Amino acid sequence: MRAFTRITGIAAPLLRANVDTDAIIPSREMKQVSKKGLAEGLFAGWRYRSPESREPDPEFVLNRQPFDRAVILLAGRNFGCGSSREHAVWALLEWGIRVIIAPSFGAIFRANCIRNGLLPVILDESDVEALTERVLQDPEGTPVTVDLVSCRVSARDIEIRFQVPPRDRQMLLEGLDPVEATLRHLPEIEAFEAADRGLRPWVQL
Amino acid sequence: MNASTLIDKIWSAHRVVSLGDDVDLLYIDRIFLHERTGSIALRSLADAGRQVRNPRAVFVTIDHIVETTPGRRHSSRMPGGEVFIEATRQSARAAGVTLFDSDDPRQGIVHVVSPEQGIALPGVTLVCPDSHTSTVGGLGALAWGIGSSDAEHALATQTLAMKRPPQTRVRFDGHLGSGARAKDLILYLIGQYGAAGGAGHAIEFAGSAIEALDVEGRFTLCNMAVEFGAWTGIVAPDDRTIEYVQGRTWAPGGAQWDAALAYWRTLRSDEEARFERELAIDARDVKPQVTWGTSPQQVIAIGDPVPPAPVGGGRGQEEAARRALEYMGLNPGDRLTEYPIDAAFIGSCTNSRLTDLREAAAVLRGRRVATGVRALCVPGSTVVKKAAEEEGIDRVFKDAGFEWHEAGCSMCFYAGGATFPPGSRVISSTNRPFEGRQGPGVRTHLASPATVAASAILGRIGHAGELS
């Protein structure tokens, strides 16, 4: 898994509430049994004037300078709700997004972010708005820094602390393979199964 | 001993080891996969040189992009979608797991098949890389949707590392309002508290209105817990559940049945158990609901006016409401009952079971779909389809002017290929009215099967009570 420590770069505001994973990557854009080749389909329903033409819609934030170089997304409440498709995370990463800052996330989407080295940061809505004001001030782009070591977001005159659950933070910082980490507990898994065959024999197939 | 909730009891019974910071390694009893997100998990596992730990606990169905037009075999409704079906088939065979292929009599939508076959049982943990896995909480399983990477983890280790979620109990008490169904209950709840109202909680649904629901209605309720932002939903197993489970293919029999039954009887929250949050809904207040916007929280009782865009609540909420009105072609104050519909869809893991089809058929019997409305019924599984045909329900649908399809997810979502034209207004028994969900520019209004059937007859949005 890809590790994450800190990043400084452009942050793009996309603040509408309840942005779902169908919007992040429409099902029609998932064309192969692959984690790759998904960036083109990112936000396809909003990014292009029509699904066929692929002509960029200049109104959409990621088509406008300087946000077309964004590495951070400033988002609204319940970002990534809906379908479990991990393709949403793969598409965001392939396009170049490494951090999403939002007041809350869809639960499965958030877990998918952690598994792939994309950092989900939860901040109060007022803090997301304050960051948005800063990034909109300079047409050349205001750099935003997100540091997972110190758990701080900073831009111009503001610095905001955030929290990430300890295990998730460790996974991200070290880029650990979760399967490898779990297989260290193989003796406990085997012991559980042996005991469970006695306790719930109807469950073990 | 401390009092425990239903979820505490199931959680504790599956704890392999504590990993600290409230994270447990939980044992996963059953894993379900489908061709859209499961194929990549199986392939990725094989690419990493790993094996499925217990192939007997893993089930695969072909549901998401398989063609559903009558007489289909293996084709996909998505252009190029056959590669997903074929990849899934090959990976499933190589891994030695049970596959319900597109021509298998047990095939169907994953969350319809898993309880139907007795694979989902009370008290088991079940995961699937599909958000609506919460559905089978309706029979007292602890079931939740995961991503493909976590599916790979579960396949390799038969476990998932999970942070213990906060818990909410939602009580629905009293008799359901006239003409209202399980679908209306959950839509009403989401309307009251918002699409993020569940906030990652594990939710136990309880109260007299839930006890009065049949198990299939409880599936509908738990299905849309995820649309409430919940981690999952569950209903304590009771006599209705036991009756539902008994005799199903993978359900226990003989002496094991008695042992299982004794255990299942313990699966309820203790009187003194504490929840982080308690919500109460008076079921008598719940009327037939319909969504007006592009989030399931944008919902009203049929006949009520579309509400004005919210003032305050942050830039995000205002922008979302404004955009929803524009996309849906509506104005605040509009009555949806004045809007003609172009199509009516009955299907999906939310509402495609036999009771759903009976509910719609009761409305359709002896009536005709309004001119110009395309109406489709897609049963949730091949078993449901056959059972409906034995009851003659297919005739009722066809005589009314509905298309009668093979089982699958069908037009709950758009993956390319045939769909409703842009701008068309569709009344749908599905779960997500998202922008573009059923096709570019398609305007989806969610409702119960009874409301979908009634609207198809009326040619506009309306409820069954409006038909004389």
Image: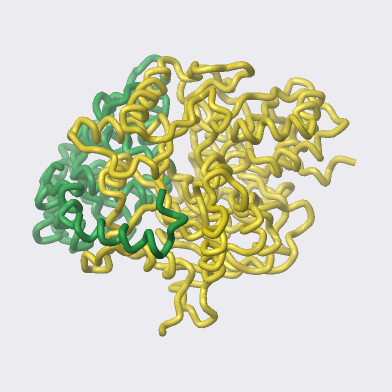
User: Residue at point 77% right, 43% down?
Assistant: B463
Residue A59 seen anywhere in this rendered image of the structure:
no
- Against A25, residue B447 (above or below) is below
In the image, taking residue B223 as reference, residue B243 lies left or right, namely: right
> Residue drawn at (52%, 49%), measured in percent from left and top?
B135
Q: Residue furthest right?
A: B468
Chain identity for the colour yellow used in the image: B
Chain in green on the image: A
Residue A114 horizontal/vertical position (percent): 23, 49
Q: How is the image coloured?
A: by chain
Write the residue at 19% across / 42% down.
A98
Q: How many marks?
A: 0
Image quarter hosting the C terminus of chain B: top right
Image quadrant where one finds the N terminus of chain B: bottom left
Residue sitting farthest toward the bottom: B1
- The image quarter in which residue B452 lies: top right
Foreground residue among B384 and A164: B384
Residue closest to the far front: B255
Can you give x and y, in whole percent of width and height, for residue A9 in the image?
13, 42
Answer left or right for B277 relative to B286.
left
Q: Position of residue B203 (x, y in %)?
A: 49, 62
Location of residue A29 in the rendering, given as x and y in whole percent from the top left corner: 37, 25
Question: What is the quadrant of residue A45 in the picture?
Answer: top left
Camera-side residue: B404 or B185? B404
Viewer can see residue B356: yes
